[in-house]
Amino acid sequence: EIEMKEDIRELFETRFYFGCEADDPMVAWAFDGRVNPMGARLRAMFSSDMGHWDVPDMNSILEEAFELVEKKLIDEESFRDFVFTNPIRFYTSVNPDFFAQTRIADQAAQVLAEGS
């Protein structure tokens, strides 16, 4: 049911999720509407490098991801989308109750109430 090129952007912005390594500077492109066709913002989401051989300290993974903000590659809102909002959207897209009875149930419900 693609009728115009904007329909393709809509599909990519709302239905596709892209798992990215925590410290990958390319993550910035997902959130940069200036470089993506038609100003698209893709739903990149934090995928931990925890099991990788080159991660000597599991406690530093999220800190390394935050370097994207410190280096001004993304802003804090995009970082929140990367590590929080987009994963919630992803996991609840099939099961809206995925986070029910968890520590973040209220925050997940708020993300769902806000919509896309």
Image (cartoon, rainbow, N blue to C red):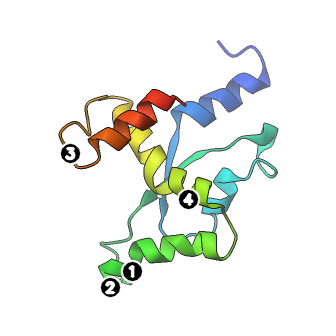
Residue type at the position of mark 1: Ser
Work out whether mark 1 precedes mark 4 in sequence or the reverse, and give the earlier one. Answer: 1
Whether residue 23 is visible, yes or no, is no
Q: N-terminal of the two: label 3 or label 2? A: 2
Q: CA distance from mark 1 to mark 3?
A: 24 Å
Q: Of the residues tagged 3 and 2, which is closer to the observer?
A: 3
Q: Residue at x 48, y 45 (%)?
A: 86
User: Looking at the figure, which quarter contains the N terminus?
Assistant: top right
Q: Tell me the element at label 4.
A: helix
Q: Earlier in the sequence, mark 1 or mark 3?
A: 1
Q: Are marks 2 and 4 in contact (CB under 8 Å)?
A: no
Residue 95 badge = none
Q: Earlier in the sequence, mark 4 or mark 3?
A: 4
How many angstroms separate mark 1 from mark 4 (CA)?
16 Å
Left or right: where 48 falls relative to 67: left
What percent of the width, then of the height, locates residue 85?
47, 46
Question: Type of residue at label 2?
Answer: Asp
- With respect to residue 85, does 77 lie above or below? below
Q: Quick one: which residue is furthest to the left in this view?
A: 101
Location of mark 3 (residue)? 102
First-in-chain label (2 vs 4): 2
The residue wearing badge 4 is 79
* Residue ID at (78%, 19%): 4
**Type of amino acid under label 3:** Thr
Task: Find residue 57 and name its label.
Answer: 2
Q: Are marks 2 and 1 in contact (CB under 8 Å)?
A: yes
Residue 85's place in the image compared with 70, above or below, is above
At a point 39% along the width and 42% down the height, the residue shown is: 88
